[in-house]
Image (cartoon, helix red, strand yellow):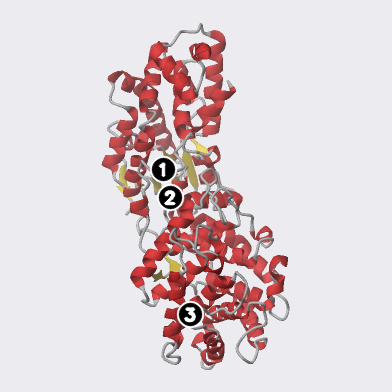
Amino acid sequence: MALLALLVIPACQIPRHAEPDRISHREDLIHPPPRRASVDHAMQPIPDEAFKAARLGMDWLMTHRNENGSWASPYPAAVSALALSAALRDERMSETGFPLYWENTIQYLLSRQKKDGTFSRAAAAEWPYEHALVTKALADALLIYADSIPELRQAVKRGIRRILDGQQPAGGWHYGYATGRNRSTPLTVVQMDALFSALQQGMYEDEIQAALHRAADDLARMQRDGSGRYGYLYRGVGQPVMNGYALYGLQLAGWGLSHSARRGWMDALHATPSWPETLQWPLFAAYYNHRATYHHGGLPWRQWEAHVYRELLAGQSEEGAWTAPFRERALGPAYATALSLLMIHTAAHSSPLLSHYVQAPPGPLYRIGGADPTSFILASTLIESDDGFLLDVFLTDLLHQVERVHVEGAPRVWFQHLSEAATHHMEHETPQPLPREIRNELNRLFSVPARHAAVWDHAPPWAIAFLVWGKALEDMERDFNDMLEHQLGIRLPPGQRSESIVPPSTYADAFAALTHEQGLQLLQHALALYRELPLILDHLADAWCAGDEEQLTAWTERLLGDDPATLAVFDRIARPLRAHLTEAVLERLTGGETALFVLPAWHLYGDEGVMEQLRAHGLELERVP
């Protein structure tokens, strides 16, 4: 029975990722590299202390600069470039004299450029980091210094040319700009960052866009299948510290809503430590994670934002400097101070948002007219999967606007009741043999030796049907922890939780009441649906993303099949449940609180769906644009 319980759990879940022969949503969700845009989602106001800390930190940097415009470090050009990047985002850049001060640093960086376009003169293999950081800083500086330093643009173009020429055929970059198959995730993203800045200046547009897409494809290939975590040098070794780098790189290429990014965010929320623990990583990794979460917004930013100001402010010395974690201590305080300033300035909105979001909420949301106060209905089709990040920013804000969140029920409790009902059947009912062809198909599907095939005769056919559905979705690496109640729970405001409006034994009672023949019909449908299920769920996801109610209905019907006997079984289960859901919604609409009802699409749509039943009670359901 343990096997039954294990495989029943994923049966109501959405697949984690699409295989190559199925719809991957790639064409719909990967865009050209984004242009810089204004912030288009709500943020908390930046504390005044953060602005004061930024001013103090910049003053420290300016008083500790060498006469030639550099800062002391084993990698002086890289640290000087980070300091320049921080200064370019300082509010004083518009003040008289402040831009003139930084021309000395720009001239120092320009003097480092060699004949081949390279800005770094370090002998270490890490010099591509330094080259990319300098190139990015100078590209950003063109916004202010293009006229006063005419040689700046040509120097940036030569630096970008070196990065483009150093890209490997597979899309990544490696230490020393080495060719071959070895590559580095952080190094790749730093090169992408420089290319993106040059793209904003109109340089090599076609080449850079192609390079960014190749690099994003390389990052996605470095993602571990099981966890969604990204590798450092190889795909098979996923490391939490790599998530921020890779996710920001995907954003730079316009892949911020790609399937790879959504899987990566799901892993990052579970695996990425909060800010204090993150400082055990390199500060450089924390910086890129900071940028990725800021540009994504929604839940990742809310979780990160809760720590960033407190820890940054607590880590600043009285003089204004910051100290890097022990792994980077040798790079000097100017390095840590510049990165800390860049994080504060990013949070202060001086770093423009990489806009990847459609303006309207993806998937249909309905406002229930006639209810007082106004309430909403949302289909749960994607929320419980990594595709839920398609609506993360919108959903997180919506959950903070309503007073109550109602769901169909708690799946964990349902599965317990289903398992108990199946166990009761096996203990009290006489085994009935299954048809030989069904036995043989189950043996092949679950690798059961023929001599043990009689095991199928002991479980009720409806429970075996759940096994088949569970096996199909388990093959897609669906994580039970990402169920609807969990995904809502981590986005809800503190102290709020979702509430079930369906008794926990509803499904168990409905399935346990099926006769052997009805259960057998359900099992045959499950076996017939096994290979088609991933395709159907992908189409449902596409229809949901497009807000296409007609296709949502059509693919829901495809999920249920067109066999009259099977439809009669589903109807026996669904009809009373839909009636109960309708009555529960009506009852809660009179509670005097703004409510959000998150219900499965297969209960909402169709002639006898919940929405039609609500309309029959005189309520208006208006699509929220």
Pointer 2: what residue?
259
Q: Residue furthest top?
A: 430
Q: Quadrant of residue 102?
A: bottom right
Q: Dot 1 surroundings within 10 Å: few (below 14), some, or many (20 or more)?
A: some
Q: Are marks 2 and 1 in contact (CB under 8 Å)?
A: yes
Answer with mark 3 or mark 2, whichever residue precedes in sequence: 3
Three-letter code, disc 3: Asp
Three-letter code, disc 2: His
Please tell me whether mark 2 sits on a helix, a strand or a loop.
helix
Cα separation, mark 3 vs mark 2, equals: 38 Å
Please tell me whether mark 3 sits on a helix, a strand or a loop.
loop
Q: Is residue 352 visible?
A: no
In this view, 547 is above or below 573: below
Q: Quadrant of residue 481?
A: top right
Picture quarter with the C terminus: bottom left
Q: Quadrant of residue 417?
A: top right
Three-letter code, disc 1: Ala
